[in-house]
Image (spheres, helix red, strand yellow):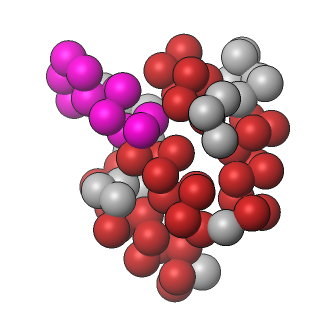
Amino acid sequence: MGEVISIAVRHGLGSRLRGFGRDDGFGQEAKTARALRHALDEAGVTFVKLGQMLSTQRDLLPEAFIKELELL
């Protein structure tokens, strides 16, 4: 678990761990989505597969996240 948190923090997601749904301004959602994609990719194949599965759930995530996760 510590390694997953370390990867998230390394990709700038540390501040989002507590309040993932908050949008801090214009373009922030796209930056967060991109950081999430990079973090999942670094975390390994299991997390990539999780991201791919999430990309098919358009009712769960905003469009910016769907677009980024589709790139996995």
The residue furthest bottom is 2
Does the rendering let one see residue 58? Answer: yes
Name the side, left or right, on which 4 lies relative to 49. left
| Residue 54 locus on image (x, y percent) | 73, 35
- At horizontal 54% and vertical 15% (from top left) the residue drawn is 63
Q: Which residues are magenta?
A: 24-34
As displayed, is residue 19 above or below residue 65? below
The residue furthest front is 71
Is 30 within the magenta? yes
- At horizontal 35% and vertical 59% (from top left) the residue drawn is 11
Does the rendering let one see residue 62? Answer: no
Secondary structure mostly taken by the magenta-highlighted segment of the chain = helix
Question: How many numbered marks appear?
Answer: 0
Q: Quadrant of the C terminus?
A: top right
| Residue 67 locus on image (x, y percent) | 56, 22
- At horizontal 72% and vertical 16% (from top left) the residue drawn is 59
Q: Image quadrant of residue 57?
A: top right
| Residue 15 locus on image (x, y percent) | 29, 55
As displayed, is residue 17 above or below residue 23? below
Name the side, left or right, on which 36 lies relative to 67. left
| Residue 22 locus on image (x, y percent) | 35, 32
- At horizontal 52% and vertical 82% (from top left) the residue drawn is 3
Is 25 within the magenta? yes
Q: Quadrant of the N terminus?
A: bottom right
